[in-house]
Image (cartoon, rainbow, N blue to C red):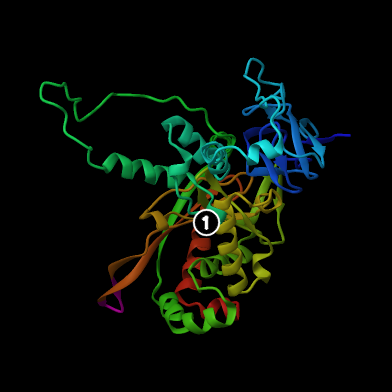
Amino acid sequence: MTIEVRVPQLPESVADATIVSWHKKPGDAVARDENLVDLETDKVVLEVPAPAAGRLTEIKLKDGTTVTSGQLLAVIEPGAAARAVPGATMSAAPGEAPSTAVPGASAPAIMAAPSGAVTTAAAAAKPDAAAAKLSPAAKRVVEENKVDPKALTGSGRDGRVSKSDVVNYLSAKDAAPPASKAPTGTAVPSARGERAEQRVPMTRLRARIAERMVQAQATQALLTSFNEVDLKAVNELRARYKDSFEKQHGVKLGFMSFFAKACVEALKKFPAVNASVDGNHIVYHEYFDIGVAVSTDRGLIVPVLRDADLQSFAEIEKSIGNFAARARAGTVTMEELTGGTFTITNGGVFGSLLSTPIVNSPQSAILGMHKIQDRPVVIDGQVVVRPMMYIALTYDHRIIDGREAVQFLVTVKQCLEDPARMVLGV
């Protein structure tokens, strides 16, 4: 009796997925719920767990194959011990040398083998264990640069190696001084080195991002308005209550909860900013699902805060922190990335002073936050230094007029400069 491993049911919005990497090979033992393979969709990387403990006898499809819901991926023999299976190779990769067992080898013979043989076997298995901890993005960089996975130290959950870990390793390696000088008379390469190029296929997520951005600019009449916010009051509140807030709620009081709450107040006053276009109709959403853009090694994803108007400051901070951690670990679910009526993106964390964000279609508007910078401003006839931030609203001019966009930004500004407004609803 064997058990088939199939592609899980994909959401309605996802037509197919791509096999990124197998974590097991034919003949390997697998534990129940152990991750066998990573599937990349337009939005997330899905892990396919083993439905039962046993031995992986056959892999039907190789890395890079596009698959759909229910398609057969592999076959498991339940309860069987791991062993090298003669002729058990990836069905979709003919011509590869099958792994074979040593004729006549038995468990006692292996135990009695010289210590050097055991060491060699362990060393041979170690690259597989190290490679299993590579994220899909990290694996591509490792293969492109021929990096030994054993030399990498992962900063992710359970020692998982991210793309940034590999990039940092390569940067440190390049910066290291050479072991010895080139002998006299030997040609030394120029400092510039070879003018090499690499052609790397886009990941599904990157291709989807590109498609969505071009689609938004091609189908929507996008325009951006700007304003600036004095964050002195927010800074004072955070400084005054940061310790008690963190002690009581177990999370730090950041800026995103203030901006999310301010946007909700502005969306209530200007419902067109929270609306979307469906054919010749305008759909006014009477709920406030705020998308928060999160940058990851694979690209930008936008988890959604459901019913942000009903969440407290602490709940919003916890949700955003949770999203950020799981987005970088690749464990955000498809449901958490779908929907959304409005988006907030913060380029300020990377040092951006001003930008024009692109709307996350089919939404009709997006708020861009930027770097907080001390600047001189005139208040009551006096020049004072205040922590200022430029904010930008990109919107679909088909359904949002300039008056509404400007007043939306003014409302956000007023709520942040006088946070009591968000409590009193004025």
Q: Residue furthest top?
A: 95
Give above or below for 73 relative to 35: above
Q: Which residues are magenta?
A: 377-382
Question: How many numbered circles are shown?
Answer: 1
Q: Residue at x 55, y 41 (%)?
A: 122
Q: Residue at x 17, y 25 (%)?
A: 188
**Element under label 1?**
helix
Image coords of residue 48 (percent x, y): 72, 42
Q: Which is nearer the eye, 256 or 244?
A: 244
Q: Position of residue 47 (x, y in %)?
A: 68, 44
Say whether residue 248 is visible.
Answer: yes
- Is residue 152 highlighted in magenta? no
Relative placement, left or right, of 88 versus 161 is right
Residue for badge 1: 405
Label the magenta part by its dominant secondary structure. Answer: strand
Residue 278 placed where, x, y %? Answer: 71, 43
The residue sitting at 38% across, 53% down in the picture is 354
Which image quadrant for residue 199?
top left
Vertical position of residue 38 compared to residue 90: above or below: below
